[in-house]
Image: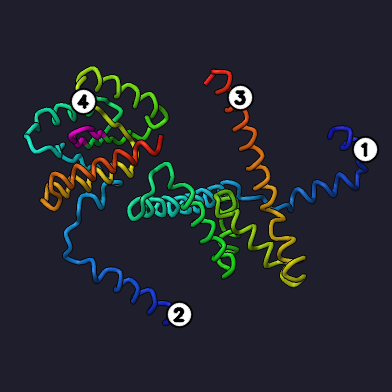
Amino acid sequence: MKAAYHLIVSVSLLLLTACSQNQPVKESQLALMKTTNPTPLSTERKNNSDRVEDIKRDVSSLPELYDVAVIKGEKDTLVVYKVKHMHRFKMKTIEKNLNKKLEKNHPKENFTVSSDYKIFLEAVRLNEGMKSGRLSHSKAEKRLEEIVKMTEDMK
Amino acid sequence: MASKQKKMTPQQKNYQTLQQKHELKRPVLKNCIKAFLVGGIICMIGQAVSYFYIYYFNFTEQSVGNPTVATMVFFSMLLTGFGVYDHIGQFAGAGSAVPVTGFGNSVISAAIEHRTEGFVLGVGGNMFKLAGSVILFGVFSAFVVALIKTLLVMWGVL
């Protein structure tokens, strides 16, 4: 009985670990557990990386936040962040303050702000897709709109 | 209590001191640590389940609670059926009863206990003997809270 138990455990461990060797770990796979700080990107064709980086710097300056993803689209700009553990009691206030700050510093942008892990994960996945060239500008814009819609559905 | 002790006969008093001498002390701290660890492990598994739903399905942090709770209750029901959860319960006490898995355990253990009395009057009639009060209390308190919120919204307070 004991031998059968050991056999089952070792075979399942072998099966589970065998296929995962030498595979590159994507950043999005660990996005919920560690700080990823993805580079801010824009789905637009024209180069406006300075503006996007400016937005990210503004958001990161808040002491309660520790991981920020910014993706600028044609219509909306998605800002997703993680809140430090002990500050999670004041999520609403943080979101309000962030909205105020962004509207003041970047009045022309239409911001969608979220602290949801799923939105963060999707933003990191979109970022990876754009960096690797897997997603074209139009596809990335479409995906961004879907993520923004998902954020609006939560309200 | 004091008046009760006054009324005690010397024999009763002697018996009480003897009983106190031989009474086994409950290892409260040890039980607390066991409950903390096992309850924490159950919650960690729950967190892993919710991350699984966030990663592979379209659930957000807000909506992932429902499938996670359902999955955890289902796991505990299976473990109760296989007789594993009883051992966990004996070891961890409140650590296994307080999380939502204790709910699944209370449903299935009552069903197994009354299986011999038939499926309708036995299993059906006694399945929610323990968990029924939890469901009733949950539904009723949710109704009261929703009523208060609706009134506050109507009056413009919220």
**Picture residue at 77% right of the left edge, 65% below the top:** B121
State the extent of the magenta-drawn residues as a range. Answer: A70-79
Circle 4 crowding by C-alpha within 10 Å: few under 14, some 14–19, many from 20: some
Q: Which residue is mark 4?
A: A109
Q: Are marks 4 and 2 on the same chain?
A: yes
Pointer 4 or 2: first along the chain: 2
Label 4's element?
A: loop
Q: Nearer the viewer, mark 1 or mark 4?
A: 4
Pointer 1 or 3: first along the chain: 1
Mark 4–mark 3 Cα distance, whole angstroms, equals: 37 Å
Cβ–Cβ under 8 Å for marks 4 and 3: no
Residue A78 among those drawn in magenta: yes
Q: Which residue is mark 2?
A: A2
Q: Considering the image in quadrants, where does the N terminus of chain B appear?
A: top right
Q: Which residue is mark 3?
A: B151
Circle 3 crowding by C-alpha within 10 Å: few under 14, some 14–19, many from 20: few
Q: Nearer the viewer, mark 4 or mark 2?
A: 4
| Image: A103 above or below B90 | above
| Image: A104 above or below A57 | above
Q: Chain letter of disc 2?
A: A
